Image: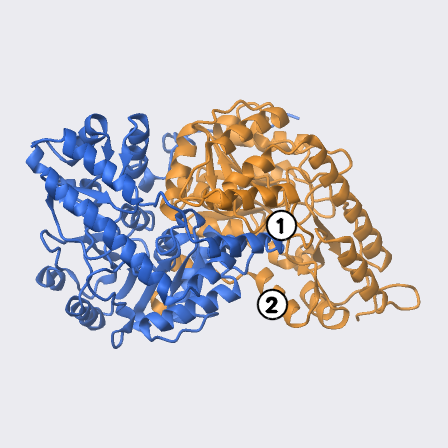
Chain colours: A blue, B orange
Amino acid sequence: MSIVSTENETTSEKIRHPLQVAKQLEQFKATIFTQMSMLAITHGAINLGQGFPNFDGPEFVKEAAIQAIRDGNNQYARGFGVPDLNIAIAERFKKDTGLIVDPDNEITVTSGCTEAIAATVLGLINPGEEVILFAPFYDSYGATLSMAGANIKSITLRPPDFAVPIDDLKSTISKNTRAILINTPHNPTGKMFTREELDSVASLCIENDVLVFTDEVYHKLAFDMEHISIATSPGMFERTVTMNSLGKSFSLTGWKVGWAIAPPHLMWGVRQAHTYIAFSISHPLQCGAAAALRAPDSYYVELKRDYIAKRAILVEGLKAVGFKVFPTNGTFFVLADHTPFGHENDVAFCEYLIKEIGVAAIPLSVFYLNPEEGKNLVRFTFCKDEETIKAAVERMKEKLSK
Amino acid sequence: MEGKLSRAAKKLTSSPIQELSHLAQRCNAINLAEGFPDFPAPLHIKNAAVSAINSDLNQYRHVQGICEHLAKIVKEMHGLDIDSETDVAICCGQTEAFAAAIFATIDPGDEVILFDPSYETYQGCVTMAGGVPIHVPLDPPQWTLDPRKLLTSITERTKAIILNSPHNPTGKVFTKDELETIAGACCSRNCLAITDEVYEHITYDNQKHISLASFPGMQERTIITSSLSKTFSVTGWRIGWAIAPASIASAIRNIHIIVTDSAPAPFQEAALTALRSPPEYFESLRRDYQSKRDYIIKLLAGVGFKIQFIPQGSFFLFAELPEDCPLSDVEFVKKLILEAGVVAVPGQGFFHTNLSTNETSSASCNYQKRYIRFAFCKSETTLAAVSEKLGKLLDVEGKLALY
């Protein structure tokens, strides 16, 4: 049966190519992480770029997930989380912050913290609304906010200590600001927001009726000071979405189990978006996560100790090679200034480092709205076993000269 | 603080299917509502997942082998030649593949055509992206597509047509003629097609699922979405994909990375094993589901439901309330839960009143409250238990006496 259109076909506005990607996404190409990882593989470089461990998660967590598969927990989980996991998250949150939250109404389990951010932004931000970010920022924040059509205002944290410039923040935040996004401990700088900084942010948010979205995935990799959740500050729980995940604390980044904690009036928006983006997340892996979050304190003590040792190896090594290294108080990242080596910018330096030296790092320019601000900096990770870190340091000592 | 919700979120309501499930749980009802099996997933696939976890395949990954298997499968099933390097995006279930496809292609104000009744999530997603859902009704009782209704719904703002076949909730498998109609419309009006083919391997009576992308002129403008979930009874693993021309697949991949970063690593590995299943696996899947279909039709027709359309695919039966039943679908299901201890989904949640064809007279739309969706992806024990429970509520003529 042939279909003959009886309507007149084209006007000049109708010349539209169906294969055109939605406008706000045309700017996004493959992430810098993927690019650098591919380049690293091609050149056999040791990858200190992308932030995932080359060692695996604890056996007891994997066993719990395996048992869940064997027990038949392979169908759709409850959309906002397997009940036992929500309870485990609430218990852990209480231990860590003292805050008591309702597992069924104030916690939503998401596909990693990445999806918590996407669901929070899509559920709570309207096109055109203003959101403040601290640069350098993890690249998915900017991309997700662009997808939601947000108006992004960026405040730069500057070396050497990446302290929050309170005056900049005061002059940027206003009653037009919808939300501010905080990541502490901070990727890529390793900075931890201090009590004073968070108090300043809190009072400005209360004064201007601004929401806070906080990404705390590295909260168990806090080395030199206590991690503070802004939700614990007076007046803040009602306007904060606190996000976290399993991946970094338990070296299971590929499981994609994360969560958002928020009061019910904010959680509703997060849940709606989550339902349409993902519906529910992996059932057996949530069962594994529930076991993980009940780990004894000794697990976290050991985790911290291991990472502090790895940090020492990398930081000493980078300094010995000739980098200017900035102090990192948390996460498994460290920033270094590459300019002693005389390359044009961070991307050029990273390409040289991969191709000629055989080590991969991440150029920092992509973490800023204005790439110029990052051109002197590169990010190394120490979430690798000690032999790998030592080997990378050796390669750099051998071949990298000022 | 409710004022802080985004406009898009305010338009959305919570899933009626999930709410009914909660009621059913509280009443301990047999769940023929939610579309997932209560029998175990295939052992060889579970073993593959266990093995992946034990082999430390637990970090962020993209398992390219999945793309290669899919390329082989779509070639064998539909004759489509795709580039496994560029044309496939692995996502967290078909849900995410679909959401990413929508965000990749729909700008605010774009119209998107859906066939009514439709799975509730499609509209929610389109709305979230700022698109305008336009519902084209399929005509009961056979759920046929009237080409005029489709063509008159297409405007210069129409960006895409969504096609779910085999179809949830009716179990319809769109015919070759209907697919040609849709394909012709897409090509002549320069629209995209986004398909949901999750039930592609669950078809009956020797019906074959035909992918819209296999029609002339369609591959270059179609995004196919599907997943492991229904074919391999692992709805809780969240492994799905989108297949599309390279530029669109790339945009979908980028969005996937922004929104969820990676599909669960160990289950991607297990997907390789699943997708390598031999033809016998798929044959026995169809056979088992067909016998469940036949059982439930016999049971429900026997107690008075009107079943004028036999499902040709999916694991859903869209049964019409008995002629003399004065209750609406929602009232009926509530009674079914409370008195029979069985839960199903009232059909009205799948129908939309803002139909493109202006048929707003209550008579012609009355049918929207007369259908109930039963899922028969349940074990024989479960289905037999349903029979037993309903058996206790029959009148002298053997019909359900709930009203």
Decide if residue A137 is in sight here: no
Q: Tell me where residue B164 appears, x and y as whole percent.
A: 60, 42
**Disc 2 and disc 1: Cα gap in Å?**
23 Å
**Residue A85 numbered tag:** none
Say which label, 2 or 1, has the lower sequence index.
Answer: 2
Quadrant of image for the N terminus of chain A = top right
Amino acid type of the residue tagged 1 in the rendering: Pro
Q: Tell me where residue A126 appears, x and y as whole percent.
A: 33, 57
Q: Tell me where residue A306 appears, x and y as whole percent.
A: 29, 54
In the rendered image, the residue lying farthest to the right is B396
Secondary structure type for disc 1: loop
> Compared to A208, does B387 lie above or below?
above
Dot 2: chain letter: B
Quadrant of image for the C terminus of chain A = top left
- Please tell me which residue is depicted at 76% across the width and 33% down the height of the picture: B206
Dot 1: chain letter: B
**Residue B22 numbered tag:** 2
Amino acid type of the residue tagged 2 in the rendering: His
> Compared to A49, does A107 lie above or below?
below
Decide if residue B355 is in sight here: yes
Characterize the local packing of mark 2: few (<14), some (14-19) or many (20 or more) Cα atoms within 10 angstroms.
some
Residue B282: quarter of image: top right
> Compared to B322, does A316 lie above or below?
above
User: Which residue carries the number 1 mark?
Assistant: B117
